[in-house]
Image (spheres, rainbow, N blue to C red):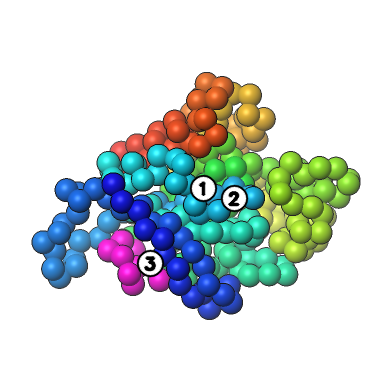
Amino acid sequence: MAQIEMNALSVITCGSFSARVFLPEMNLLALKDTAHEKKYPVLWLLHTEGGAASDWLSTPAEACAARYGIFIIAPDQHHSLCTSMRYGPRYEEFMNTELPGICRNNLPISEDPAQNWIGGAGTGAYGAVKMALKHPETFSKAIALNGVLDLEAVCRRALAGQETGIFHTEASLKAVFGDLNAFAGSGHDLYALAQKPARGKFFFAWEQGSGVEEENRCLAGLLGAAAQTAQLEPGADLGACQCSLPAAVRWATAE
């Protein structure tokens, strides 16, 4: 098993970025491919708010990449919610265009949407599902692990002066989305996006008692046959996607 840290300059976000890259086991790499013709599937992973790409070091990400012969790339997302911010970097654009381009210039990963999947935990799951719903030309599958998906409810709490439940306040959410009163039905609202025909496939996994069951079931229901769900026993993930991530990677690589 192996993992590396990538640091590079992003023109779109106007600064440098870091990403963790988890590599397939050596016996699953075409080491004699001197022409570099072999291209590998890739799972892009997004951390939750208040976290960083290094969070995935405590998860089975490295083992999953090694076992299934895929690359797993986890970039830092800071507090962007994988959104082209109203006042800040254009992270949605970065994830959809620039980051894949930079990684493909340096790693033998596929450009085929069928071999590009995106996942996340917590609010990272929101970003992953949004990217797959809006950009099926780039990502064919999305994985939501204990996903915080109802960002409209988060915005409502912020406007009411309540705790948002994530590492955001009303002011910082406005920096991301702009007018919070206009969130519902917008291109940031997963429930509105899911009511349009979905071209991709979606996997939702959550722990019982995690507090996100209803929003995950609701979104999966809107996606219908495009969605698969898995409910885990309380504490099964040990706070580090111990069960949900391997299950999600099995799902992604089996189809």
Residue that badge 1 annotates: 55
Within 10 angstroms of label 2, few (less than 14), some, or many (20 or more) residues? some
- Which quarter of the figure is the C terminus placed in? top left
* Residue 165 percent across, percent down from the top left: 74, 41
- Spatial CA distance of label 3 from label 2 is 22 Å
- Spatial CA distance of label 3 from label 1 is 20 Å
Amino acid at dot 2: Gly
Q: Spot the residue most to the top.
A: 233
* Residue 191 percent across, percent down from the top left: 65, 45
Pointers 2 and 1 in contact (C-beta within 8 Å): yes
Within 10 angstroms of label 1, few (less than 14), some, or many (20 or more) residues? some
* Residue 122 percent across, percent down from the top left: 59, 42
Q: Provide the secondary structure element on which disc 2 rests.
A: loop
Specify the label residue 208 is tagged with. none
Q: Provide the secondary structure element on which disc 1 rests.
A: helix
Amino acid at dot 1: Asp
Q: Residue at x 32, y 69 (%)?
A: 106
Q: Is residue 105 magenta?
A: yes
Specify the label residue 103 is tagged with. 3
Q: Does residue 143 appear to the left or right of 127 in the view shown?
A: left
Q: Does residue 102 appear to the left or right of 28 in the view shown?
A: right
Q: Which residues are magenta?
A: 102-111
197 or 210, nearer to the observer: 210
Amino acid at dot 3: Cys
Q: Provide the secondary structure element on which disc 3 rests.
A: helix
